Image (cartoon, rainbow, N blue to C red):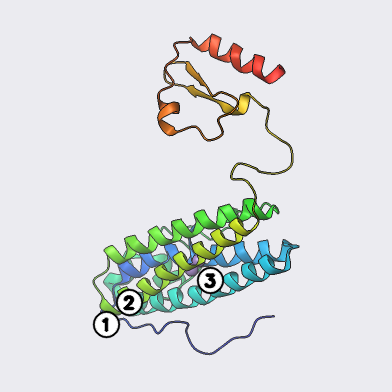
Amino acid sequence: MYHHVKKLMYTVRVDEPDPAFGNMLLEQFGGANGELAAAMQYSIQGLNCEDPDRKDLLMDIGTEELSHLEVVGSLARLHLKPTKFDREKAEADPLIAIAGGGGVNLFNSQGNPWTADYLKITGELDVDLRSNIAAEARAKIVYERLINFCDDAGTKDALQFLMTREITHMKAFAAALESMKKPAFSIGKIAPTPGLVNQFFNDSTGSVFLMSSGERNPPLTCIIRATVNHDIMTAFKIMIQAAIA
Ligand code: MN
Ligand code: MN
């Protein structure tokens, strides 16, 4: 159940409206890494989740993302306001000024409509949590870029709040994944093919590096050092032999 609390999660103040910046803000309103995408991704994952504690976490963070959508929408509206009465500003973005009356709509900064294709929902809880950790990292970096291009103190303040909350969510999703106590490379139920799973190819030269069966986590330098000078056909033969062994 949702209740509408008639205040914003964070007070929004804009001293100098900047329609071009308002347009960039729409990336976090109706864009691929924006607040609606986050709200829908976590809420729908939550609806599908059988584990009561983690379901609660998903639904709660999904709800907070809706509150973020409200903050971003309010901020973008204040910045876009001049497109309502300033011909020059309106001309710069007819989609917002003429079609949308100077308000926000579910588009990204390029005017592309929001789509459920943005969402990552697999129905496998640990896989979904990994997607969410990555989604929060993307949201964080988009906020950081917006902050870097912003001169308005009030706007920066609200964006700093929103950016910080994404790191909080990232920590919560990471803790939820950690608490499932699944080994790092254990995905689903069918085990990967032994031998084959530990082959790392240097696909630039066709050389191959084979891990010994006892090694679990190849150091990156070992993979990069994959200089056993097999030609590409030999590498594939080794791979196929390992697959059928
Ligand atoms: Mn958010
Ligand atoms: Mn978030």
Amino acid at the residue labelled 2? Asp
Q: Which residue is mark 1?
A: 15
**Mark 3: few/some/many CA within 10 Å (<14, 14-19, 20+):** many
Which disc, if any, is residue 157? Answer: 2
Q: Position of residue 241 (x, y in %)?
A: 66, 14
Tell whether circle 3 marks a residue whose Cβ is less than 8 angstroms from ligand 1. yes
Alpha carbon distance from label 2 to label 1: 12 Å
Contact check, label 1 and label 3, Cβ < 8 Å? no
- Comparing 116 with 35, the one in front is 35
**Mark 2: few/some/many CA within 10 Å (<14, 14-19, 20+):** some
- Kind of element beneath mark 3: helix
Residue visible at 49% across and 77% down? Answer: 70
Q: Position of residue 213 (x, y in %)?
A: 60, 25
Q: Quadrant of the C terminus?
A: top right
In the rendered structure, the answer to whether residue 13 lies left or right of residue 238 reads: left
Amino acid at the residue labelled 3? Glu
**Residue mark closest to the camera, 1 vs 3:** 3
Alpha carbon distance from label 3 to label 2: 18 Å
